[in-house]
Amino acid sequence: MNTRMRRIRNNPHLRPLVRESGLNLSDFIYPLFVVEGENIRREISSLPGNYHLSIDQLEKEVLELEDLGIPGVLLFGIPDHKDATGSSAYAKEGIVQRAIKEIKRVSKKLLVITDVCLCEYTDHGHCGLLNDQGGVENDLTLDYLAKTALSHAQAGADVVAPSDMMDFRVAAIRKALDEHGYKDIPIMAYSAKYASSYYGPFREAADSTPAFGDRKSYQMDYHNSDEAMKEIALDLEEGADMIIIKPALAYLDILQRAKDKFNVPLVAYQVSGEYAMLYQAVKAGLLGQEVIYESLIALKRAGAGLIISYFAKDMAKVLKEDKIELI
Ligand code: PBG
Ligand code: ZN
């Protein structure tokens, strides 16, 4: 055999033709953090380059995203009021509900995907309701998640994305949506969501750090991989339409197994800690900024169809102008 591998590498004009994966603008979803107040566009210190926006600032942001060609946002709300049941999460005029309406007023094109969880809204910072022992009560929480998802749909959300990791929440949300005439609203379920240290910068940004304990009784143990396949299978049975794997880069094995096993759209969430690591390493001059592109390609290669990323805007510019100038 005379297989010279370098024959397909030598010519820089041939190399792109034999690539097995790539990134498109249409692969990206951009996380957006909405806060109460007016005239607020405040850089998030733990996520430089990303902003807390008040509702009156959304128009400008949405037009920018549209202009860049980013297809969708993942919406997070940071309310003024927190309580034991996270009532601001499902308030008709809650922060997310008003933000959805504003985005929809400005753009007919931008997809609005909403993160459905209670941790930004509960005074204890957990993703569900607590029992007397301070544990997170699964079945009691389901109603509240369903109410939250329904209120998002009623406000005009295109897709709801439950991130709480309670058992049966996809079924509860599907039922609530169906019963109220939202049969066509898809559920993008965070199915394989690990209890991870990579969420640190997000919790600072979303003010959702648990007041005590951790999330290990509901989010997955990162020693496990078979368990992720089971979580995904259950969510699909309950009616999930799309599946999120989170975090992304340290969980490529999960992504690849999911791709091999399930024929559904797979979403990789490049989380806040991944963003922070790459951003800081590039900023410090330790790594060239192409490392960001390389990391995102890894997600595609492993099987991701879509990527949720804080780099989405930067990548849109890169992909449009064909030059890397991220930070
Ligand atoms: C809420 C939620 C979290 C993230 C997305 N939705 C935080 C958490 O579970 O503690 C993390 C996103 C990121 O780190 O970028 N449940
Ligand atoms: Zn949560």
Image (cartoon, rainbow, N blue to C red):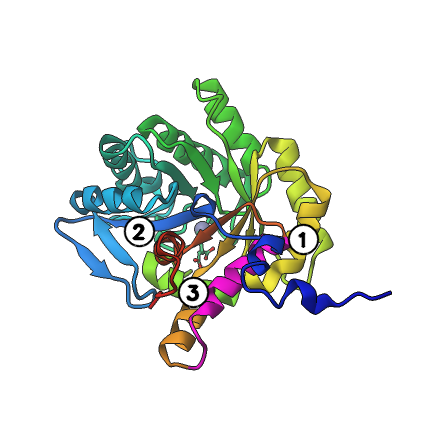
Quadrant in the rendering for residue 203: bottom left
For the residues carrying marks 2 and 3, which lies nearer the camera in this image?
3
Does the Cβ of the disc 3 residue fall within 8 Å of ligand 1?
yes
Q: Residue 275: give its label.
A: 3
Question: Which numbered disc flags the more N-terminal residue, 2 or 1?
Answer: 2
| Amino acid of disc 1 | Gln
Helix, strand or loop at disc 1?
Answer: helix
Q: Residues within 10 Å of mark 3 (few under 14, many from 20)?
A: many
| Amino acid of disc 3 | Tyr
Question: Which numbered disc flags the more N-terminal residue, 2 or 3?
Answer: 2
Q: Give the x, y percent position of residue 161.
A: 47, 40
Q: Residue at x 72, y 46 (%)?
A: 260
Where 143 sits versus 320, above or below? above
Give how far apart the Cα atoms at labels 2 and 3 are.
16 Å
Residue for badge 2: 33
Q: Give the x, y percent position of residue 101.
A: 26, 32
Give how far apart the Cα atoms at labels 2 and 1 are.
30 Å
Magenta range: 286-302
